[in-house]
Image (cartoon, helix red, strand yellow):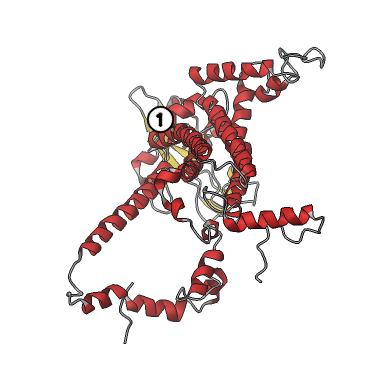
């Protein structure tokens, strides 16, 4: 036999239906409900507070000059400032994000060997960004690139295209020259 | 609580080592366990063992001490949250305050809770002091706690003062400029005060210079006031609060006349001291049961 609460015992003794919704229950529900709702709202608000609406970071979108500037080969012009290589490879221009897919170092472009080489753990990539040696598990990523109405190249690093997903076929991932 | 949940807890939760290492007493079904539940809990043990009837009367204490402590907690929590969006640097501080006020979700609410809480806390601490004075609660055996309380009042005002500079607007700049100019005139410590020439005080080596970190209110002042406001003074304050609360219990509970037990104990101590006998008991030790 399970124990019954004092309240139910008392109600039985005085001959009141123990299942009836009493004034005490209603007031208790309102009181505790308000208490816990306040706590929950406070916690939710505090949690929301940790996610700012405005950040003071640099825009992931930058202008990269005229497409004509880019002769066939790898341009390191925006490597230091934007961590992106602008590459003209056989009639198309694409923006390769200089983040090694092994542990996130910045690889070097070695023009004599015609490859990207990561000096952290030796991952090697073709000019296309596809990996072929070392520990890198997959190709480097390309950023969105397009020509704006003034004829200038624009790179948007917030949109990335993966070789493995077939993203490099997407017309947003390159510009024809 | 439903009996199913109760059964589950009894079988699978209460007997576990984790539960028993945290709650070191049995179920509160008898007086002993009920008192252990309070005594073995760091937060609950601050409550007195007995409560005089008058202490529960709101008109007697106004609850100002408790309200001041509640506001201290509010200030601590909101202050910690505000620190996430604030750089104490001359170039960044004002921008951060504006961003808190207009960009950050709930930033305006938190900042105003902190600000109004601070104003309110200065009020409640003053009213607490006023009440303690009017009910004569500074008298024996509470003299020492009155002194601690005066320190806490001063610290509350200093917290208010240091916090005043942090918005880094015109009001803050000039309020702190005027406020700290008073330090120039402190005897022996300020360079414009009495005896300053005896000690060779100049504008760049007196107490005001140490407070500002320079000769005028500037970037170093902001950093100093920030560290004082957020770390140094709250640390001292928490320490004194602990002593303050502990003394309330040791001096016989919230306000009211000295308890007969404490009075007797003091009398015994005094008589013994007068007779030149070695003191066997002090106020801090409970009397042995005879």
Return the residue nearer the eye: A40 or B248: B248
Q: Residue A59: x percent and y percent?
A: 44, 32
Q: Residue at x 54, y 16 (%)?
A: B174
Return the residue nearer the eye: B179 or B248: B248
Compared with B172, A165 (above or below) is below
Image quarter where the C terminus of chain A lies is top left
Q: Residues within 10 Å of mark 1 (few under 14, many from 20)?
A: some
Return the residue nearer the eye: B156 or A139: B156
Q: Residue at x 64, y 52 (%)?
A: A121
Image quarter where the N terminus of chain A lies is bottom left
Compared with B97, B252 (above or below) is below
The answer to whether residue A145 is visible is: yes
Q: Residue A9: x percent and y percent?
A: 27, 78
Q: Residue B74: x percent and y percent?
A: 46, 42
Q: Residue at x 61, y 45 (%)?
A: B142
Q: Residue at x 26, y 60 (%)?
A: A29
Report the residue marked by disc 1: B101
Regarding mark 1 in the picture, which secondary structure is present there? helix
**Please, which chain is the residue tagged with disc 1 on?**
B
Q: Residue A69: x percent and y percent?
A: 48, 25
Q: Residue furthest bottom?
A: A1
For residue A90, what is the image quadrant?
A: top left
- B12 horizontally vs A148: left or right: right
The answer to whether residue A60 is visible is: no
- B54 horizontally vs A14: left or right: right
């Amino acid at each position: 036999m399970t124990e019954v609460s004092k309240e139910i015992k008392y109600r039985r003794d005085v001959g009141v239906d123990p299942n009836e919704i009493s004034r005490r229950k209603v007031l208790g529900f309102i009181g505790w409900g308000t208490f816990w709702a306040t706590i929950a709202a406070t916690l939710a608000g505090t949690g929301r507070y940790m996610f700012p609406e405005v950040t003071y970071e640099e825009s992931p979108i930058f202008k990269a000059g005229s497409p004509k500037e880019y002769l066939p080969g790898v341009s390191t012009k925006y490597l230091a400032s934007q961590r992106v290589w602008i590459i003209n490879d056989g009639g198309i221009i694409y923006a390769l994000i200089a983040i090694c897919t092994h542990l996130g170092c910045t690889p070097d472009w070695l023009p004599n060997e015609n490859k990207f080489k990561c000096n952290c753990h030796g991952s090697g990539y073709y000019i296309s960004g596809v990996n072929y040696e070392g520990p890198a598990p997959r190709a480097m990523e390309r950023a969105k690139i397009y020509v704006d109405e003034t004829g200038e190249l624009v790179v948007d690093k917030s949109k990335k295209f993966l070789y493995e997903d077939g993203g490099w076929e997407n017309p947003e991932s390159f510009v024809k020259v | 609580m439903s009996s199913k949940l109760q059964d589950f807890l009894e079988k699978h939760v209460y007997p576990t080592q984790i539960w028993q290492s945290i709650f070191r007493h049995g179920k509160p079904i008898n007086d002993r366990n009920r008192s252990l539940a309070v005594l073995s809990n760091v937060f609950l043990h601050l409550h007195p063992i007995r409560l005089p009837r008058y202490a529960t009367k709101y008109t007697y204490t106004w609850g100002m001490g408790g309200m001041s402590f509640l506001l201290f907690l509010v200030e601590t929590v909101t202050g910690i949250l505000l620190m996430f969006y604030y750089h104490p640097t001359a170039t960044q501080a004002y921008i951060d305050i504006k961003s808190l006020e207009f960009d950050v979700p709930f930033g305006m609410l938190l900042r105003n809770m902190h600000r109004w809480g601070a104003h309110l806390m200065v009020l409640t601490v003053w009213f607490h002091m006023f009440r303690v004075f009017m009910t004569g609660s500074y008298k024996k055996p509470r003299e020492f706690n009155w002194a601690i309380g005066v320190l806490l009042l001063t610290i509350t005002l200093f917290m208010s003062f240091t916090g005043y500079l942090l918005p880094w607007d015109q009001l803050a700049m000039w309020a702190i400029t005027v406020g700290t100019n008073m330090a120039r005139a402190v005897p022996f410590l300020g360079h414009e005060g009495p005896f300053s020439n005896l000690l060779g005080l100049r504008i760049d080596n007196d107490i005001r210079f140490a407070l500002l970190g320079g000769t005028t209110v500037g970037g170093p002042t902001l950093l100093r006031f920030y560290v004082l406001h957020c770390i140094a003074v709250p640390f001292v304050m928490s320490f004194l609060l602990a002593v303050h609360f502990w003394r309330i219990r040791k001096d016989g509970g919230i306000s009211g006349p000295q308890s007969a037990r404490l009075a007797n104990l003091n009398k015994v101590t005094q008589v013994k001291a007068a007779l030149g006998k070695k003191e066997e008991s002090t106020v801090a030790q409970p009397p042995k049961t005879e």
